[in-house]
Amino acid sequence: MKTLIFEGAGWVDADTSKATDVTNCRIRTRLRNNSGRVIYLEMGCCHFENPKYTPAYAKNLNYATHIDHLFYCDSNWDNNRNYSRDLQPLANTYFEYNKENILKFVNEKLNCSFDDMIVYNNNEVRVHDTIDPLCSCAEGEYKNYKHQDIEFNISELDGVDPLYSKEGFAVYKISHNSLMQLPYMKRHFEYIKRQNIECKEQDNKVHFRWNKNGIITDLYISTTGASIWVSAEDIQTIIDLIKVDNV
């Protein structure tokens, strides 16, 4: 029997906590999935009494689930953000807040095989007191995530003048043609085009943050209609594109 374990992170006496079999209006966990990846998941629920103020995602749901954090903990890069890039679309998944649906979501969307779930509400379990998973459904041997120590130094952009910079932060220009070489940016621009929104070259920027040793810790692309967080595997590609655009 593999049990999905959550910490109850909300007010246990709230009406929304008492209203479902989850027993808490906000829950969080750190789990290891079937392939050995470690994932942090935090979610809660909302109840809207007045249909006039009910958002579209909560229509036809009594207690609507919202997913607030979903990222890979075993990647130093992803561990700095609310959502891993390939998990971020799941943040737009909404369902009735109950144990059955939460278990189904975790198993089907996060590559897990848990049999049941439990929520601890009295500090028996505290996610942030440990870096270890609270629960695991991995069986047999598995390999730790191979990119967890991927590192790039901001010094790779020495000689390229940023549009703006301060200690530990800088913004660089990047061309539309360069961004089109990134599949997810190409999809974004195709979507923008279908919406008849004009793409402006001057909107295309890359934002870097780095630590005291110059190691890049954060990178996102801002463009017409979006700010898009970048995975660590794409850092070198984007650095190379910036260099080409700024010759």
Image (cartoon, helix red, strand yellow):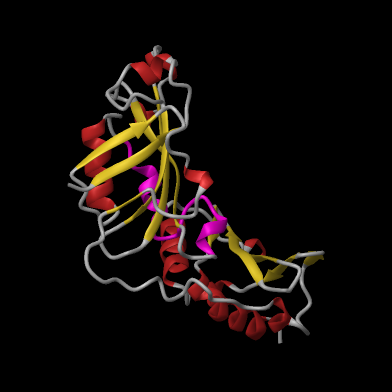
Residue lying at 53% horizontally and 72% vertically, measured from the top left: 179
Image quadrant in which you'd find residue 117? top left
Residue lying at 36% horizontally and 63% vertically, measured from the top left: 37
Provide the residue span drawn in magenta: 77-94
Residue toward you, 168 or 122:
122
Residue toward you, 15 or 244:
15
Residue 201 visible in the snapshot: no
Q: Is residue 151 above or below residue 61?
A: below
Residue 153 visible in the snapshot: yes
Image quadrant in which you'd find residue 77? bottom right
Return the residue found at the far front: 124
What percent of the width, then of the height, locates residue 94? 32, 36
Residue toward you, 66 or 131:
131
Residue toward you, 44 or 48:
44
What percent of the width, then of the height, locates residue 16? 39, 19
Return the residue found at the far right: 166
What percent of the width, then of the height, locates residue 240? 60, 84
Judged left or right of residue 35, residue 42 is right
* Number of dots carrying numbers: 0
Q: In the rendered view of the protein, which quadrant contains the C terminus?
A: bottom right
Judged left or right of residue 210, residue 228 is left
Asked whether residue 204 is drawn in magenta, I would say no
Judged left or right of residue 21, residue 8 is right
Residue lying at 18% horizontally and 44% vertically, measured from the top left: 115
Q: Is residue 70 above or below residue 162?
A: above
Asked whether residue 78 is drawn in magenta, I would say yes
Residue lying at 57% horizontally and 57% vertically, measured from the top left: 80
What percent of the width, then of the height, locates residue 215? 67, 73
